Image (cartoon, helix red, strand yellow):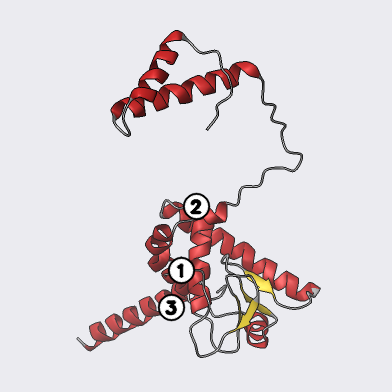
Amino acid sequence: MNKTIRTTTLAFAASALTLTAFAAPANAQRDPAYAAARSAGTIGEQVDGYLGIVGAPTPSLQRLVDDINIKRRAVYARKAQENSATLEEYALTAGCQAILRTVPGEKYQAPDRTWKTRTGAPPERDARCP
Amino acid sequence: MTLPKLTLPAGFAKDVDQWRNAKKGGAMRQKTGWAMAIALGLSGGLSGCINIDAPEEPIVIELNINIRQEVIYRLAEDANETIEENADIF
C-alpha cells in the first residue's frame, strides 16, 4: 500500500515536472536586454503591433527590435489565419492591447505616431481600439 | 437661366415644352429632368473627348484605414491571450 502511494506520488511529480517543462517556453519571461530597453524607454510599443526604437538607433537595439518583431509577425500570421483575419488586422489589435499593457515609464506610440511615456493615466490609443 | 443652344431630338423638344407648361413640381418635371440630363450627357459625349493621363506617382492605398473597429473588437480577446502566451516577446 505504502509503495503504491509512493509510486503514485512519484508519477504525479514526474508529470508535474513534464508539464512545467512544456509550459516554460510559453510563459517565458522577457530577455533581460529587452526588459531593460523597455524600462529605459529606448524602445516602445508602436500602434501597428510591433516594437520601435524611440531615440537614435544603435546596432544592438536594432537587432533586439528586429528579432522580436520577426517573432511577433510569425505569431500574428498564425493567429490571424486561425481567426480569419488579415495579418495587419491582427497586428493592429495586438498593438492596441500591448499599448494598454504598458506600465508607467514605458514608451508607446500615440495615434499621431509620436512617442509618449506611459503614466498612470490610460494611454492615448487609436479610436478603434477596444 | 440661359442654356447653350443644342440640337435635340424632336421628342426632347416636346418634353421641354411639356416641362415649360407644367406647374411647379410633379412627376412630369422629374421625368423631363432626367431626359434633359441624358441629352446633355449625350451631347457632351459627342462634342469632345476627355483624356485622363495616369499619374506619375504610384497610387498608394493605405490599407490601415480599411481595418474596421468591429474586426478589432472581434480579435481583441484572442490578441490578449496571444500576448499572455508569448510573454517573452511582448
Identify the element where label 3 is drawn: helix
Residue matched to label 2 = A86
Mark 3 vs 1: CB contact within 8 A = no
Crowding near the residue tagged with mark 3, few <14, some 14–19, many ≥20 C-alpha atoms within 10 Å: few
Tag count in the figure?
3
Q: Position of residue A98 (x, y in %)?
A: 52, 74
Query: Which residue in the rendered view is the most extreme toward the top?
Result: B10
Q: Earlier in the sequence, mark 2 or mark 1?
A: 2
Residue matched to label 3 = A20
Q: Earlier in the sequence, mark 3 or mark 1?
A: 3
Mark 1 belongs to which amino acid? Cys
Q: Residue at x 56, y 59 (%)?
A: A74
Foreground pick, B61 / A71:
B61
Identify the element where label 1 is drawn: loop
Crowding near the residue tagged with mark 1, few <14, some 14–19, many ≥20 C-alpha atoms within 10 Å: some
Identify the element where label 2 is drawn: loop
Crowding near the residue tagged with mark 2, few <14, some 14–19, many ≥20 C-alpha atoms within 10 Å: some
Say which of marks 3 and 1 sits in front. 1
Mark 2 vs 1: CB contact within 8 A = no
Foreground pick, A29 / A87:
A87
- Residue B15, quarter of picture: top left
In this rendering, would A66 be left or right of B17? right
Are labels 3 and 1 assigned to the same chain? yes
Mark 3 belongs to which amino acid? Thr
> How far apart are the two marked residues, 3 and 1, measured between alpha carbons?
34 Å
Chain label for disc 2: A
Say which of marks 2 and 1 sits in front. 1
Q: Residue at x 35, y 25 (%)?
A: B31
Residue matched to label 1 = A129
Foreground pick, B69 / B16:
B16
Q: Residue at x 73, y 70 (%)?
A: A63
Asked if residue A14 is positioned above or below residue B35 in the image, the reply reads: below
